[in-house]
Image (cartoon, rainbow, N blue to C red):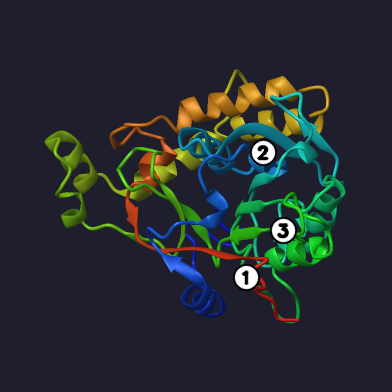
Amino acid sequence: MFSKKTRKGFVGGVALALAGVMAGEAGAADAALASGKNRAILIDEDVCENVNVSIAVAWANANDYGKDLFFMTGAGAVYNLNTTKYLHDYKDFMVFSHGNDTQIGPNSNEDFAEHFYMTQDKAPDSVFFKSCEAGVAPAGEPSLLRYMQLQFKNEDGWTSGTKGIGVLSGPPGGCQLVPSTVMRYAGAEVRTGAVSKDNADFGGIPNPVVRQAFQTIADGTIFGNVSDKWTAQGAYAADQNYKTTCQALVADVKNKKQDLVNFISEVIREFGQEDVVPANNVANMLTSYSYDKGGVANVTCGRAADCPSNE
């Protein structure tokens, strides 16, 4: 998701260096998103920070990356939200949260890796992170990806004779979704260092009304509407906003699992519908994402390569 430092994914010098060496250009296939996998999606309390975790869930569902939701508390307890399976039943995972080079959600990188390790019986085939800077190593420390790699390095994999996590994937800086088709999830990719489109980039939109809307309505207007609506009192229900409603559900997630699932679905309906054309009153995150292009793909590592570290 977006870095805890910024929305649009500012990339510092270290992140840019990693992006140039270890991350592919836009359009490169991510081995952690290979087709035909039954992935578990793991979220945490940062689902309440803003709309982005819920929008990532919609993206995963639309691209058939995964549908089974799990919630991890700050203490490492895991609850299955919309399935009767357990986290250790899966070989492949997606983790959606907010982060920076030392932290993911409420946990340090090291603590998260330990918590996740305790949920597993075998080393996963793949773990994909949509949490900013998961692939960035801070001074003197491993990256989140490296902590995960080290935690499982001696554990048997699902395939006989293998050790450790097969492939890990995480952003080399601030991150966001970048749609390949405006206002559509299909084909959208997680990218670091995306840049704003100019009017010429929207020139190929066949519908003249949609084309003109993107060329005349500022992205800042759309994103501002999203941010304002998330915390506006009464926007969710009488005397409630989206953020505080979410926080109340998360605080009692053991007993509010279905309520949290319903809330995420409501957020997707309100902030993440496809084909919502820009307008001054639009508060749609997928529309906002559609103003950006380019960027670099996630860092990938695992059995074939060490993950980033400054140890």
Please tell me which residue is depicted at 53% across the width and 41% down the height of the picture.
56
Is tag 2's residue or tag 3's residue first in the polypeptide sequence? Answer: 2
Q: Which mark is residue 85?
A: none
User: What is the distance, in whole Å, between disc 1 and disc 3 at their CAs?
Assistant: 18 Å
303 shown above or below 48 = below
In this rendering, is residue 137 above or below 205?
A: below
- Assign a secondary structure to mark 2: strand
Between disc 1 and disc 3, whose residue precedes?
Answer: 1
Out of 296 and 139, give the one closest to the viewer: 296
Question: What whole-number distance in Å separates the C-alpha atoms at marks 2 and 1?
Answer: 24 Å
Under mark 1, the amino acid is Val
**Who's the residue at 34% across and 32% down the image?**
281
User: Hey, what amino acid is under mark 2?
Assistant: Ala
Circle 2 residue: 40
Q: Specify the quadrant that holds the C terminus.
A: bottom right
Q: Nearer the viewer, residue 308 or 165?
A: 165
The amino acid on which the numbered mark 3 sits, given as a three-letter code, is: Ile
Q: Is residue 130 visible?
A: no
Residue pictured at 40% horizontal, 40% vertical = 286
Locate residue 150: give its quadrant: bottom right
| Along the line of sight, the residue nearer the viewer: 116 or 281 | 116
In this rendering, position of residue 15 left or right of residue 162: left
> Which residue matches tag 1?
136
Query: Do the numbered discs 2 and 1 sit on residues whose CB atoms are within 8 Å?
Result: no
User: Which numbered disc, 2 or 1, marks the residue that appears first in the sequence?
Assistant: 2
Q: Residues within 10 Å of mark 1 (few under 14, many from 20)?
A: many
Find the residue positioned furthest to the top. Answer: 238
Residue 166 position in % (x across, y down): 67, 58
The local secondary structure at tag 1 comes to: loop
Q: Please, is residue 150 above or below residue 82 in the view?
A: below
Residue on which the image places disc 3: 165
